Image (spheres, coloured by chain):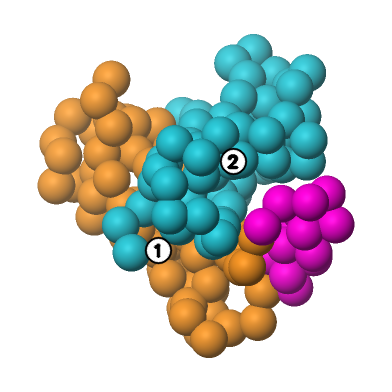
Chain colours: A orange, B cyan
Amino acid sequence: MRLRVEVRLKPGHFDPEGDVTAKMLRDLGFPVTMVKTGKVYIVDVESDDREEALRLAEEMCRKLLANPVKDDYSLEVLPT
Amino acid sequence: MRLRVEVRLKPGHFDPEGDVTAKMLRDLGFPVTMVKTGKVYIVDVESDDREEALRLAEEMCRKLLANPVKDDYSLEVLPT
């Protein structure tokens, strides 16, 4: 089963990469007021069960992919 | 208008970060066969026009956010 995991900074956390990207886009002439960055993981797990796959992905986020102090994450099962 | 830009490696391109993440997840006991990584940008642009906002985002990808040789990207207007 293929999963999509998106990890983003919680609201209010400082995102220097987003700030630099916004500045560069403005320097290129784009009317940009804010940029926030995040990370996407496309993960294939050996499971045919949707609920089990989501439970595994949740555990992967808690153990490795997301930092519970500063990150939010969202999970989605992708069509294969 | 708020946009979501997702940048991922084109199929067939080597993704060492994804490979390392997959190995770490397997070492933690997860039944993972593949991980691919990507980047998300949430971008606020000063435009009320959906088509113009998407056109700007397309141009941002071509000029800064994506590498045309190795990256694919997808664009989406987010509800505000």
Front-most of residues A35 and A52: A35
| Left/right of residue A57 with respect to residue A32 in the rendered view | left
**Which SS type dominates the magenta stretch?**
helix
Mark 2 lies on residue: B57
What chain does mark 1 sit on?
Answer: A
Q: Where is residue A78 in the image (x, y as percent from the top left)?
A: 29, 32
Label 1 secondary element: strand
Q: Quadrant of residue B21?
A: top right
* Residue depicted at 53% across the width and 72% down the height: A9
Mark 1 lies on residue: A73
Q: Where is residue B34 in the image (x, y as percent from the top left)?
A: 50, 30
| Left/right of residue A77 with respect to residue A63 in the rendered view | left
Residues under numbered marks 2 and 1 in contact, where contact means CB atoms less than 8 Å apart: no
Front-most of residues B62 and A15: B62
Is residue B76 found inside the magenta-colored segment of the image? Answer: no
Label 2 secondary element: helix
Tell me the kind of residue under disc 2: Ala
